[in-house]
Structures are given as structure tokens and as C-alpha cells.
Amino acid sequence: GAGVSQSPRYKVAKRGQDVALRCDPISGHVSLFWYQQALGQGPEFLTYFQNEAQLDKSGLPSDRFFAERPEGSVSTLKIQRTQQEDSAVYLCASSLGFLAGLSAETQYFGPGTRLLVL
Amino acid sequence: ILNVEQSPQSLHVQEGDSTNFTCSFPSSNFYALHWYRWETAKSPEALFVMTLNGDEKKKGRISATLNTKEGYSYLYIKGSQPEDSATYLCALCPRGGSEKLVFGKGTKLTVNP
């Protein structure tokens, strides 16, 4: 079956440009997550949706970062006025969610979008 | 904040060698511990989810154990193959928050033919 897909796979942006990264989760998955992986680090949590509700955005590094999931399926992570420190791999993951009755749900990841800000 | 440490940072082994690496954590205040394998240019692939002290999981030549009392999990690969080359990530799902995962920095494994 189809896994999580992300687009674009690679993005080069000039400093100050706005970018939008898209995530298509597995159909029927309630929970959706965005993570950021900087070079040499593990993935770090950015934000989390349960259906269309953004329940946790504590990991967003600044107000230049904005995420939405308006219909509870596809999600977009937008970064305004990109800076060089935004260069990273942005990973999206989805899961059935705790609503499935389990507190140990597997998160299924997409291949990531590699963002390079020049 | 739950801190997840992985060691070693990188590892080079010969084809056929068995190997293991460690994920350590200071507290057992989490729902589950996850292991992922991440090959270059691919999606991170879920290997195991473990929840209970003493849990042992196996998938082919790869197995994992969890010791929440002493704060570590081991991942073992028996008879490494070049296709095992990847970064292995450990992550915890902390209690009391959202379903987010807290990751270690990973162990990069290279298996030489």
C-alpha cells in the first residue's frame, strides 16, 4: 500500500524566500507529525496534528514556521523568510494515533524534504 | 526533558560480523521505545516498538531488548550484510505529552563486503 509521501524531495531557497513543504500521510491515519533533522543530529519534533487539530506546536523554532492540516489529511509546513539555520531534512510521519487504543503506535515516515537555504 | 543517548556514533564492521549498539535513557517515564532503520535517500523504517521491561523483539537477523530499570535498550545484528548499512535511530514516546517521539542522534553502521 502507499506509504507517506513528501514533496518536494529537495528544495534550494535563497535566504528570505518563503517555502512550503507538503506531506501526504497514509490514508486513515489520525495523527501526523513534523520533525526537523539538522546535520549530525537526530530528528527533532516540530508539531503534531490529530485530524485537523494542531494539538502540539511546542517544537516550532520561531513564528516563521507554520503548519496546517485543514481537512485532516494532507499537511503543509510553511517556512517564511527562510534563514540559513533552517537548512535541514524535514520529515513527516503519520500513525493511527492513540485513538486506536494503543499508547505505542508506530509512526510511519516519509522520505523527507531536504531544504538548503543559501 | 527525556534525553536519549545512542552509542557508538558510528561503526564499521566486516560482512558476517555480529554487532550491537546501545540506546540509553535516564528515566522510564515513557510509553514506548522505538527502533528505526534509515537508509540514505529512503524513509526511516520502523523495526521494533517495545513497551515493557524485559521485552525482546526479533525480525530476521535483527533483535532488540529493553531494560527500563537500568535505562537501556540494545539492538543486535547477527551476521551483518552490506544491505544492513544504515543509520539506526532510537526514539522514546514520553508520557504526559502528545504522541511525539524524542530521538537519539543515531548510530551509523557501515558493513564492508
Image (spheres, coloured by chain):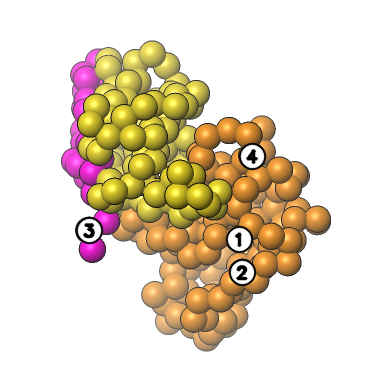
Q: Colour of chain A?
A: yellow
Magenta region, residue range = A1-24
Depth check, mark 4 against mark 2: the one in front is: 4
Between B70 and B39, the one lying in front of the other is B70
Whether residue B94 can be seen here: yes
> Which dot, 3 or 2, sits closer to the camera?
3
Percent across and percent down for residue A58 are 50, 23
Read off the chain for label 1: B
Task: Kindly identify the amino acid type of the residue bearing the numbered disc 4.
Answer: Arg
Give, as a three-letter code, the residue at label 3.
Answer: Ala
Along the viewing direction, whichever of A39 and B25 lies nearer the viewer: B25
Chain under disc 4? B
> Which three-letter amino acid code belongs to the residue tagged 1?
Met
Question: Which residue is denoted by mark 4 in the rendering?
Answer: B95
| Residue contact between numbered discs 4 and 2, judged by CB atoms under 8 Å | no
Q: Kindly identify which chain the residue marked by label 3 belongs to.
A: A
Checking the image for residue B50, the label placed there is 1
**Res B64 label:** 2
Of callouts 1 and 4, the N-terminal one: 1
**What's the distance in space between the residues labelled 3 and 1, CA to CA?**
25 Å
- Identify the secondary structure beneath mark 2: strand
* Residue B10 appears anywhere in the view: no
